[in-house]
Amino acid sequence: MSRFREIGHAEPAVPVRGVIARIAGRWRRLWPLPLWARVPIVAGGLILAVALVGSRVMMSIVAREQEIGVRRIEAVYLDGIATTVYPHVLARNLPDTIESLSRSMWFHQGMSEQRAIVLLPDGSLFADVSGPHGTRTGISPLHNPALQRQLARNDGFVFDAKSGTGWASRAIVRNGNHVADLYVALDLEPLLAERRALRQSLMIATILASLGAAGIGFLIVHRMVRPVRLLTDRLRRAQAGIFDRVPSGMLPPAASEYGRLLRGYNDLIDALGEREALAARLAERERESVLGRLAATLAHEVRNPLGGMTTALDTVRKFGDDPDARSQALDLIERGLWSIRDVVSSVLAFHRMPAVGRKLTAGDLEDLRILIAPEVARRRLRLTWDSAIDGAVNVNATETRQIALNLLLNACEASPARGRVGFTASVTNGTRAELLLEVTDAGPGLPASVLAALTELGTLDPNDPPRGLGIRVVRDLVRSLGGRITATAGETGSRIVVALPAGEPSRQEIA
């Protein structure tokens, strides 16, 4: 059997895009809510949607069962009415036909009839009787050919949802002869009321079940995400600089995922604490090391000019009557005092960008020759000196003197007795003017660790660290002036070349 066909009633179609847009808008409004609130709301919404779909399916099943029951009753009812009115219709006895229809409609207990119509085979109206539950108003097969076609298509039964009326039809046939067509309007409002009550009950039950599920889900999820909220709170405090461990009494079981997560957080906090303590200890040691290096560097850099100044004083005492010797010695003492002043100023401004000092002159390099003369004589070395500096070079005089003096002293220390120490100074005139300082010695060659520390190329050997402050001082000073160092070492000596930019000074802060 076919299902009910509802005339003049159709549910409005809702565009899928509009539904999706509404859902997305509601979800955006829910987004600021915490996870433990969003999850139950979403779960309750899904349960409600599934329940609504289930309710529609259930109502469809109920409607189909109701239709089957009504059609069975309608078939028996039409058989009884057709049997009753057949002789009167065949005899064209209208009063008896109306009487039979009225009696059947008034005394029938299984159906609520509203109207009964008998049409002859030629389509003319033979009888039209209203029952106790209806009138002759509303749609009828007499004036609606579409209703007649629907009755023909739907096995003689059509449901009018607007009026709550169901039309049933039966052809009265006797011995193959078409006697008449019987149409009966049935009052199906009680059926609709029952269906509406069932739909309302299902809706209320669905909403209550969804709310209950959402409430239970809220309690469950709120309890489940408690460790996550605890971890979130600890992370926010850690972001503010407060590193708190999760108390052991608040930790979930170790075998659970949250238990492992929070214990991992505690391990992280412990590791951070140990790291902070280690960093504090290393910082303290670094401060002590910096202070030690600073003091040693200061002593090292001040001692060298003092040696030259002492030699100059001895010269004044012995040859004070010679104006040239006296003037040369006094100039050396003056430049030595300037060097000590600049070194002290650079130490005081250790954490500041040093001011651009005076330019380098040929006399500054000649002072170095005088300063290392006592060391050369003491070690019985041969000094080769070649300075091609003419006028002033746009490099810092004090720091350049410190670089050259350290390299010369290290070369003297590395060279054997009667060995040769060489010094060359020149200025290139290419695309980028540079001051080149070259120092050679006759020693056994620089160790790999010293080469790595000096040029910052290669790997330092932890078992053979470079000794002495000269290497570190030269490297830092060259870096501060924006220069570079190249060094080569052989079996019979070493060669170190320092290239300093002789244009505008390029400086960077020494960390």
Image (cartoon, helix red, strand yellow):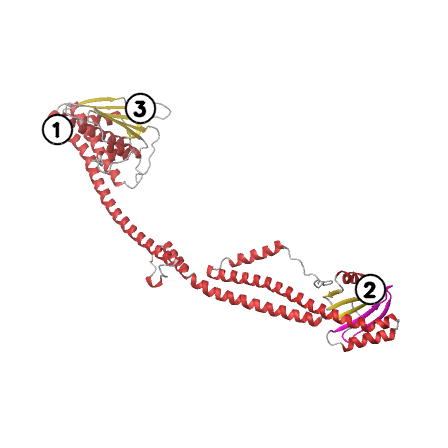
Kindly identify the residue that appears in the image at 36 percent across and 26 percent down.
432
| Mark 1 in CB contact with mark 3 (< 8 angstroms) | no
- Tell me where residue 365 appears, x and y as whole percent: 24, 26
**Quadrant in the picture for the N terminus:** bottom right
> Can residue 120 be seen from the camera position used here?
yes
> Magenta stretch: residue 360 in it?
no
**Quadrant in the picture for the C terminus:** top left
Tell me, for residue 427, which label it has, or none: 3
Residue type, numbered disc 3? Val
Residue 52 placement, left or right of 75: left
Which residue is the site of mark 1? 314
Q: Secondary structure at mark 2?
A: loop
Q: Quadrant of residue 13?
A: bottom right
State the residue in front, 321 or 243.
Answer: 243
Q: Mark 1 or mark 3, which is nearer to you?
A: 3
- Tell me where residue 288 appears, x and y as whole percent: 22, 45
Residue type, numbered disc 2? His
Name the N-terminal-most of marks 2 and 1.
2
Q: Mark 2 or mark 3, which is nearer to you?
A: 2
